[in-house]
Image (tube, helix red, strand yellow):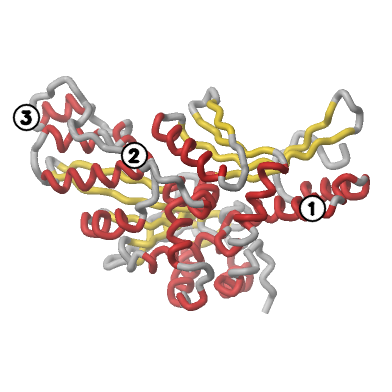
Amino acid sequence: MIPCDCTCNWYYREHITRHCYRVTNTIIFLIIPLSRSNQQNKGRRGYSTTASTQTGTATTESGDVQLSETIANAMLSDAIANYDPSKDLGSPEDFQQVANGVFQAEGSISAYIRGTLIKPLFTLGQALSPGSLAFFVRLWHAVGKAGTLRLVLSADNRWILRLDSQSWTHILGVFTNYFCFVYGEKFIGFRKLAAIYRIGNSSASLEVFKLVYSLTTTSSQRLLSLPVFLASVGIEYDGNSNPSTVFTDNFQVPSLLFLLGLWLGDGTFSIRIRLVAARKGNLWLIPTIRLAQLNSAMNQHLFDMFAAGVKALGVSSHARADKRGMLDVVLEGSTNVLPIIDTLFTQHIHFLYWKYPQLEMLYKYSVFVKSGIHSTHIGLIAILEMIYSYPSERDHSLGY
């Protein structure tokens, strides 16, 4: 048997070694092109009370290996069949905090209308990888197997592992309670769905349809504007698109584990290399943790809560808007980044999942810094070689 050589977290490699062996041992099949008919026949497969099938090819998260439908679904079914909760690392309560952070970054709450019938929609997805398999299988069991855990093929031909549901019972009875630590659109979205259900999800009510259209994750994607839709169902529009029901955001300071989950979903981890022009040959190495969200009032509130959460570690963050309509919150420099690595990431390495390779680079950097070797010529070269050993788009080569 060929040893596993993936970038798995060694803490939870025990959970996923089987999947790594499966992919490694079937590599001979991966280099054989699928037939044209298989490439054109794309669907999906899920684990729930109902299931469908999927065929086709897609890339892994790294994009360098093609996975057939058979192998991708074998990875998922094997992970589900071999899941053993007694081997989970970290308490269920800690995992819940991490899962809430991931949902804050990657999940969505919405609703759609069929005639005058309203159906809710919960989704949470991540690119297929050994880490995402470990996370989603544990999450699916944590919520009592509510919803459907499935593989879907994305528009850019990648396998996405997704947990979703259109069940009022699952969304209001399970997911609302489990994902109770979120903020902004997610926090208020659950409450809007509860209000819709309370009023009557099949009621032709102006307030109900205003609530549906106010779910910001879907309102801009609707084929009909609210006034046009209301006219089509015979309801007079009062000129105000805002529902009369007022919702309050979550003002509880997030836990550090919630922030870890948020970074898992939308965080990027890097080390910037800056050549100081005033001092020829002098380099600054700047570890950076970045989190990006759409620039909105709700996300500004989220970042205010973020700043309050990291303040407990003596860490300061700054948020800035860019021209793309995004809002970035950034931690820069060893003073702000190393406490996060030492206090959060190192102590909870088993929760790093698919972001472990990026965090591994920062962890190695912190070891160099704490040893003092970074201030020597040999140490600086070693750090630069370590940084360049990780794949990334760079302006200059290592030789430069």
Say which residue appears at 48% left-offset and 68% top-offset.
91
Residue type, mark 2 in image: Asp
Most extreme residue toward the left is 234
Picture quadrant where residue 329 is located: top right
Q: Quadrant of the N terminus?
A: bottom right
Secondary structure of the residue carrying tag 1 is helix
The location of residue 297, given as percent across then percent down, is: 40, 29
Q: Earlier in the sequence, mark 3 or mark 2?
A: 3
Task: Pinpoint residue 67: horizontal percent, then vertical percent.
Answer: 54, 60
The tag earlier along the polypeptide, 1 or 3, is 3
Which residue is denoted by mark 1 in the rendering?
370
* In this picture, residue 334 sits left or right of residue 235: right
Amino acid at circle 3: Gly
| Measured Cα–Cα span from mark 1 to mark 3 | 69 Å
* Residue closest to the eye, 309 or 92: 309
Tell me the kind of residue under disc 1: Lys
Residue nearest the viewer, comparing 214 with 44:
214
What residue is disc 3 on? Answer: 234
Alpha-carbon distance for marks 1 and 2?
40 Å
Q: Is residue 292 above or below residue 231?
A: below
The residue indicated by pointer 2 is: 249
Marked residue nearer the N-terminal end (1 or 2)? 2
* Residue in the picture at 55% in, 54% down: 59
